[in-house]
């Protein structure tokens, strides 16, 4: 608790929880990519996840707790930084900062709102766009559910906007993780910044490809 009561400790907690979030983004993208294999691909993947039973809910609760800590400490650190940068000092610092870095709190809050919506849509399945049903093998027809939702242009636009927010958040956040836990110096920091941007671009392209290709009716998504 003493560690979390000071700025350094809170930054370390932000870095650790952020690292878990990045790992989840990677795993989630790999799972979502099964949709490119067609109905049998993503429906089988979803059925396997459902078959894990309590493990899925334990993982969700664990990730939810990490997300809550990440949000809380992110807000606290943002308020502390603003309180420590009055007047001219803030203006000078703004000149050095990147857009992604300066908008971390806002992209983070946008992502939080999107996560809530995303859970209501594809986990709780309570949004009006959701088409419920089973495939020929008796599994939940996740493929039809996702495709029918992303064929609604406003929904795809919301999803794409969230992926842009994710790109901005991680393009700064990934290098900040390594910087905070002391794995960087002036020599390697630019490399971590490049790696962070590259990973963020891959996430942007990977996640955005799903609604874009669905809207385009490409391949397995042909009407």
Image: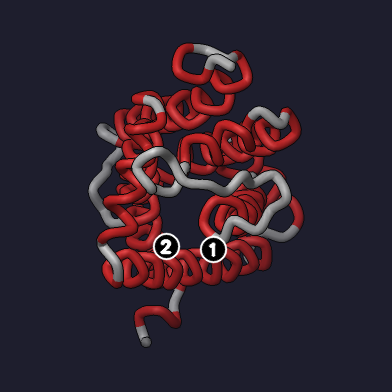
Residue under numbered circle 2: 14
The answer to whether marks 1 and 2 mark residues whose Cβ atoms lie closer than 8 Å is yes
Q: Horizontal placement of 129 versus 96: left or right?
A: right
How crowded is the residue under tag 1: few (<14 C-alpha within 10 Å), some, or many (20+)? many
Residue at horizontal 32 percent and vertical 36 percent from the top = 30
Q: Can the viewer see residue 105 in this picture?
A: no
Residue at horizontal 54 percent and vertical 65 percent from the top = 71
Q: Position of residue 222 (x, y in %)?
A: 54, 15
Quadrant showing the N terminus? bottom left
Q: Horizontal placement of 28 versus 150: left or right?
A: left
Q: Position of residue 2 (x, y in %)?
A: 36, 86
What is the distance, in whole Å, between disc 1 and disc 2 at their CAs? 7 Å
Residue at horizontal 51 percent and vertical 57 percent from the top = 123
Above or below, 22 relative to 80: above
Q: Position of residue 117 (x, y in %)?
A: 64, 54
Residue at horizontal 27 percent and vertical 42 percent from the top = 185
Mark 1 or mark 2: whose residue is earlier in sequence: 2
How crowded is the residue under tag 2: few (<14 C-alpha within 10 Å), some, or many (20+)? many
Q: Can the viewer see residue 88 in this picture?
A: yes
Q: Quadrant of residue 5?
A: bottom left
Q: Quadrant of residue 199?
A: top left
Viewer-proximal residue, 109 or 192?
Answer: 109
Residue under numbered circle 1: 74
Q: Position of residue 217 (x, y in %)?
A: 57, 15
């Amino acid at each position: 608790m003493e560690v979390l009561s000071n700025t350094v400790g809170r930054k370390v907690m932000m870095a650790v929880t952020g690292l878990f979030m990045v790992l989840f983004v990677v795993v989630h993208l790999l799972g979502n990519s099964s949709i490119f294999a067609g109905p049998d691909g993503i429906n089988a993947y979803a059925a396997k996840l459902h078959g894990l039973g309590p493990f899925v809910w334990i993982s969700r609760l664990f990730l939810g707790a990490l997300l809550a800590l990440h949000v809380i400490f992110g807000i606290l650190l943002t308020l502390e930084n603003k309180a420590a940068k009055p007047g001219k000092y803030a203006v000078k610092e703004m000149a050095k900062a990147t857009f992604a870095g300066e908008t971390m709190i806002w992209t983070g809050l946008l992502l939080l709102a999107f996560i809530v919506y995303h859970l209501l849509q594809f986990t709780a399945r309570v949004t009006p766009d959701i088409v419920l049903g089973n495939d020929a093998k008796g599994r939940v027809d996740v493929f039809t559910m996702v495709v029918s939702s992303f064929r609604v242009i406003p929904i795809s636009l919301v999803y794409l906007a969230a992926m842009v927010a994710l790109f901005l958040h991680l393009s700064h956040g990934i290098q900040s993780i390594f910087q905070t836990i002391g794995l960087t110096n002036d020599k390697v920091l630019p490399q971590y910044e490049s790696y962070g941007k590259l990973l963020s671009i891959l996430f942007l392209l990977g996640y955005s490809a799903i609604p874009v290709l669905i809207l385009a009716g490409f391949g397995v998504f042909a009407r």
